[in-house]
Image: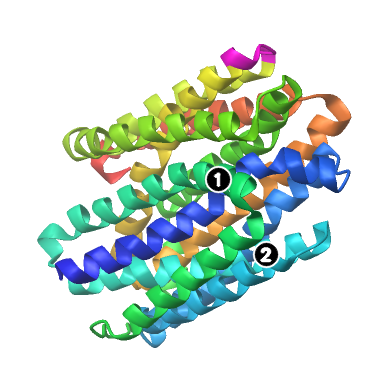
């Protein structure tokens, strides 16, 4: 089982690294292809669009056939998309490659997390999933550094190498132990989507993706305008990710000890403060510091949100593979809307407007959590 966990964690690490690798490259592509902020936002959002389309099909494949088949298929798509990205010579080709990368990502994630869930002992499942999610965060923080290195070494060579790694991981996954499929039930899905707490968990997966989608478009462009290099921008996101990696184990313990509701409320309140500060900030050093603040506050929403959605899916009788697929789709919706809408609003109204919209959404969500307590639900059930 430990070998399987290491393999799955390695796969998730590479996948998450690919998602964030574009961040420091955005200013260069914007200059090379004369992209506006809206155009840069659409390029970033292409990944989310593909992930939105692939989330539920990936979950169905993982549940109906096996998590292993979903992982292998997702990795082969990832390799093909990486090769296409390396050869792309225009914004449309880049966008299509990112779209396929996003599609493959949610297929792979649904299979990988379901693979761990179906083979690990129930009493240690949370620990295993927490370890896998921790490696995803580590991959996400390495991604900008990979992007910065790719800019220095060569994008084509770097992404071809990444495609080769995906093929190798796919071969190792094919040799891995099999995991059984799970029975799909329309009644279980219906119960889940009538459950406000299940829907709340989905929203709490989408919201941080939306906020980070805005951030990864506007912050690099603002720092680039201030004269910061690609590598320095990558370092900012790397350092902020390190903060999130260190925070995540403590957040998990707090969730176990105090339930999900308290960490969610604290994270939402902090997210309001950080996004408002970003809306009124123009100094590049302050923006860089606030990127780290977003990693602490906005990033803290993911762990309790994933736990909430997974728990309510189990109560409703939804297979974990499909539950993870649905969660991926909710995340992808935020990853699609955030950069595209945020870039468009910044282009027409200025950078402060999308940040203030994000702060408003966090504030409304925070207010909604008090309705949970008003209905007499215990924090651990929220």
Determine which residue is flagged by label 2: 85
Left/right placement of residue 78 relative to residue 379 reads right
Left/right placement of residue 226 relative to residue 31 reads left
- The total of numbered circles placed on residues is 2
Left/right placement of residue 157 relative to residue 178 reads right
Q: Residue at coordinates 33% horizontally, 38% vertically from top-left?
A: 245
Q: In the rendered view, how is the structure colored?
A: rainbow
Relative image position of residue 88 (x, y in whole percent): 75, 65
**Quadrant holding the N terminus:** bottom left
* Callout 1: SS: helix
Position above or below: 149 against 191: above
Label drawn at residue 206: none
Eye-nearest disc, 2 or 1: 1
Magenta segment:
280-286
Question: Depth check: 130 or 94 in front?
Answer: 94
**Quadrant holding the C terminus:** top left
Relative image position of residue 46 (x, y in whole percent): 70, 57
Q: Are marks 2 and 1 in contact (CB under 8 Å)?
A: no
* Residue 291 shown in magenta: no
Q: Residue at coordinates 19% horizontally, 60% vertically from top-left?
A: 125
Q: Where is residue 128, by image quadrant?
A: bottom left
In the rendered image, the residue lying farthest to the bottom is 65
Position above or below: 289 against 25: above
Relative image position of residue 106 (x, y in whole percent): 51, 66
Sequence-first disc among 2 and 1: 2
Question: Depth check: 113 or 26 in front?
Answer: 26
Q: Residues within 10 Å of mark 1 (few under 14, many from 20)?
A: some
Q: Residue at coordinates 57% horizontally, 29% vertically from top-left?
A: 232
User: Separation of disc 2 and disc 1 at Cα?
Assistant: 16 Å
Determine which residue is flagged by label 1: 149
* Residue 283 shown in magenta: yes
């Amino acid at each position: 089982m430990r070998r399987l966990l290491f393999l799955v964690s390695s796969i998730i690490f590479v996948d998450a690294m690919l998602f964030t690798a574009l961040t420091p490259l955005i200013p260069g592509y914007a200059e090379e292809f004369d992209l506006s902020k809206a155009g840069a936002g659409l390029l970033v959002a292409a990944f989310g669009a593909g992930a939105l389309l692939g989330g539920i099909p990936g979950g169905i494949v993982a549940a109906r056939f096996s998590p292993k088949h979903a992982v292998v298929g997702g990795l082969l798509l990832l390799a093909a998309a990486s090769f296409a990205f390396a050869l792309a010579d225009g914004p449309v080709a880049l966008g299509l490659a990112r779209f396929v990368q996003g599609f493959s990502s949610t297929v792979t994630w649904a299979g990988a997390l379901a693979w761990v869930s179906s083979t690990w002992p129930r009493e240690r499942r949370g620990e295993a999933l927490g370890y896998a999610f921790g490696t995803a965060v580590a991959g996400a923080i390495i991604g900008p550094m990979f992007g910065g290195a790719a800019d220095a070494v060569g994008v084509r060579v770097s992404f071809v190498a990444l495609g080769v790694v995906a093929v190798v991981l796919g071969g190792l996954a094919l040799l891995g132990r099999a995991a059984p499929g799970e029975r799909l039930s329309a009644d279980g899905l219906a119960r889940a989507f009538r459950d406000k707490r299940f829907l709340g968990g989905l929203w709490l997966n989408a919201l941080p993706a939306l906020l980070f989608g805005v951030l990864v478009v506007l912050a690099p462009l603002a720092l680039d305008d201030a004269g910061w290099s690609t590598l320095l921008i990558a370092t900012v996101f790397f350092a902020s990710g390190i903060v999130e990696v260190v925070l995540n184990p403590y957040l998990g313990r707090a969730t176990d000890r105090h339930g999900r509701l308290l960490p969610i409320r604290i994270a939402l309140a902090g997210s309001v403060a950080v996004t408002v500060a970003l809306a009124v900030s123009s100094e590049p050093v302050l923006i860089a510091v606030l990127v780290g603040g977003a990693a602490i506050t906005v990033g803290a929403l993911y762990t309790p949100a994933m736990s909430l959605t997974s728990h309510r899916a189990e109560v409703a009788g939804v297979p974990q593979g499909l539950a993870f697929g649905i969660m991926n789709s909710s995340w992808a919706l935020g990853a699609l809307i955030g950069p595209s809408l945020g870039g468009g609003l910044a282009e027409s109204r200025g950078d402060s407007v999308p940040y203030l919209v994000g702060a408003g959404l966090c504030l409304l969500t925070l207010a909604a959590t008090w309705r949970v307590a008003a209905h007499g639900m215990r924090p651990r059930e929220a």
